[in-house]
Image: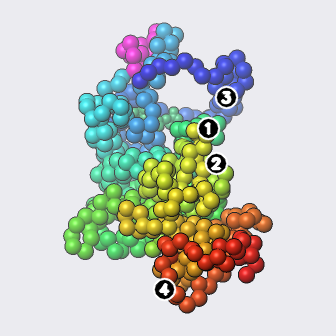
């Protein structure tokens, strides 16, 4: 870790300044002072690692565990520890026995340090599983354990879920809670606004292995119910993806393992991919008015989600990374210099979603290396052909790709219309395109350059008024 200087003017009144921090501490102290707690139950504070056993039974455990590679707490704590130690070590001599905070058992994954020693991914995974097992052992049979977690990377969720499953914890309820201060959400290193609060119980000893088909159906049903609620209360973007994990885990975690028809395991990685798919399907279902989105490609999914979340304004890079990660699309592909749908804006901190006029490559509308043509590329190519008046090519392109008969084409164009400003050229163009009838197939290839003079002379306005 490299220490840095303080980045705010501590004498001003900005977040992090001396005055604001002092006010916060005083407000907390006053609040505690006003809370007339007549009788405090026995309270035991023990300085030990969460991986160590606790020799007593409890009926509730609440934990806000370390978030994978998010923050190196022990190193940061040293900054304060050395001063507290000087001030209070005469009263708390055993707590402050060591010159610095304990680090050996700290569960954190410093990814820059690689897989070695205590800092590695394996150490974190093993430690999380051990601490959950220790919690399980001290929880009584009807007890509840609440786990709070937030992370933007699927890898971090995978580790957490594996640890919960290994410790035989079953999620029975969950809520995404808005716990992050907006001022703390940085533009370049975007953070989620909500954390997921998962309520778990002990998995009954008689629980068996589950079947993929049933688990998938249950996940689908539960996710849809809860997502409708999350959507209505305004949770969007990357937070929306992770909020769905709780409801999906209710089914998945209730079995000792989940198997497919052939006996292979339905792994945590596959579970997370399935959850993300269900979430995009749901969100796109809202945007596309319940059109079936199963056949919709990843690029168009991202395009629509981005446009729904950020509109056509510049979007912070970090937020785009979160959105792409959440929905499982590599951001670098989306930013491809030639055929990408995102472009860095000059400030470098934001990305812009490109419309058909900004995607100038001749390759737009033809197959990607994957062999597929994203629906958004087909729409952009059609818009281009329309605007340049190449009707024969447009008709041929419609025929070649069966656009007129494809309900997804209409649904996506309709969604784009709904997110275009009233009275804009783009809206008029899309409205014209959705009504376009290519007529009989003429045999002309869509890639042939138009030689028809009259076609070329038609202006955009002529075409729209047709
Ligand atoms: C997400 S933070 C919790 C922050 C806390 N909720 C708060 O508001 O201050 C995770 C905490 O887990 C602690 N931690 C890391 N490894 C641990 C271990 N082995 N045993 C106990 N706590 C550990 C970290 O030091 C950090 O304070």
Magenta span: predominant SS is loop
What residue lies at 64% left-to-right and 69% top-to-bottom?
388
Of the numbered discs 2 and 4, the one sitting upstream in the chain is 2
Mark nearest the camera among 4 and 3 is: 4
What colour scheme governs how the chains and residues are painted in the rendered image of this protein?
rainbow
Q: Is residue 96 magenta?
A: yes
**For the residues carrying marks 1 and 4, which lies nearer the camera in this image?**
4
Label 2 within 8 A of ligand 1 by Cβ: no
Q: Which mark is residue 393?
A: none
Dot 3 or dot 2: first in sequence order is: 3
Residue 162's place in the image compared with 89, above or below, is: below
Residue of label 4: 443
Q: Earlier in the sequence, mark 2 or mark 1?
A: 2
Q: Quick check: marks 2 and 1 in contact, CB under 8 Å?
A: yes
Q: Which residue is mark 2?
A: 314
Q: Quadrant of residue 382?
A: bottom right
**x and y percentages locating residue 261 in the rendered image:** 25, 74
What residue is shown at x 39% (from left), y 58% (from top)?
272
How many neighbours does mark 3 have within 10 angstroms: few (below 14), some (14-19), or many (20 or more)? some
Image side of residue 378 versus residue 47, left or right: right
165 horizontally vs 337: left or right: left
User: Distance of mark 1 from mark 4, alpha carbons?
Assistant: 47 Å
Quadrant holding the N terminus: top left
SS at badge 3? loop
Compute the Cα span from label 2 to label 4.
Answer: 42 Å
Q: SS of the residue at dot 4?
A: loop
Return the residue nearer the eye: 396 or 261. Answer: 396
- The magenta segment is 89-101
Q: What secondary structure is found at the residue carrying circle 1?
A: loop
């Amino acid at each position: 870790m490299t220490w840095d200087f303080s980045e705010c003017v501590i004498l001003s009144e900005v977040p992090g300044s001396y005055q604001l921090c002092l006010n916060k501490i005083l407000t907390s102290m006053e609040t505690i002072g006003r809370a007339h707690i007549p009788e405090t139950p026995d309270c035991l504070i023990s300085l030990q690692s969460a991986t160590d056993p606790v020799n007593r039974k409890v009926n509730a455990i609440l934990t806000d565990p370390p978030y994978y590679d998010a923050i190196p707490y022990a190193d940061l704590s040293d900054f304060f520890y050395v001063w507290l130690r000087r001030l209070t070590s005469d009263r708390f001599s055993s707590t402050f026995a060591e010159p610095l905070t304990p680090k050996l058992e700290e569960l954190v994954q410093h990814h820059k340090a690689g897989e070695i020693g205590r800092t590695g991914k394996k150490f974190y995974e093993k430690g999380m599983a051990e601490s959950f097992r220790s919690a399980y052992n001290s929880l009584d049979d009807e007890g509840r354990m609440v786990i709070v977690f937030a992370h933007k990377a699927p890898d971090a969720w995978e580790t957490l879920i594996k640890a919960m499953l290994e410790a035989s914890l079953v999620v029975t309820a969950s809520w995404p809670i808005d716990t992050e201060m907006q001022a703390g959400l940085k533009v370049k290193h975007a953070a989620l606004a909500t954390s997921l609060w998962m309520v778990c119980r002990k998995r009954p000893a008689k629980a068996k292995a589950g079947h993929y088909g049933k688990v998938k159906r249950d996940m689908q049903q539960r996710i849809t119910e809860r997502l409708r609620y999350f959507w209505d209360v305004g949770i969007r973007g990357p937070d929306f993806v992770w909020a769905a994990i709780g409801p999906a885990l209710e089914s998945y975690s209730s079995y000792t393992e989940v198997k497919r028809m052939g006996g292979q395991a339905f792994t945590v990685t596959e579970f997370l991919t399935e959850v993300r798919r269900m979430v995009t399907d749901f969100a796109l279902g809202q945007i596309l008015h319940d059109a079936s989105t199963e056949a919709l490609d990843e690029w168009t999914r991202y395009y629509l989600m981005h446009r729904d979340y950020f509109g056509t304004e510049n979007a912070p890079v970090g937020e785009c990374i979160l959105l792409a990660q959440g929905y499982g699309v590599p951001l670098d592909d989306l930013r491809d210099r030639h055929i990408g749908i995102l472009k860095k804006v000059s400030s470098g901190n934001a990305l812009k979603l490109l419309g058909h006029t900004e995607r100038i490559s001749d390759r737009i509308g033809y197959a990607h290396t994957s062999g597929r043509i994203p629906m958004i590329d087909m729409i952009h190519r059609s818009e281009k052909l329309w605007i340049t008046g190449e009707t024969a090519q447009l008709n041929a392109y419609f025929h070649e790709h069966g656009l007129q008969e494809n309900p997804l084409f209409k649904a996506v164009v309709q969604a784009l219309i709904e997110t275009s400003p009233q009275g804009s050229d783009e809206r008029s163009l899309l409205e014209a395109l959705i009504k376009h009838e290519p007529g009989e197939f003429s045999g002309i290839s869509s890639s042939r350059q138009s030689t028809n003079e009259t076609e070329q002379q038609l202006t955009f306005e002529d075409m729209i008024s047709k």
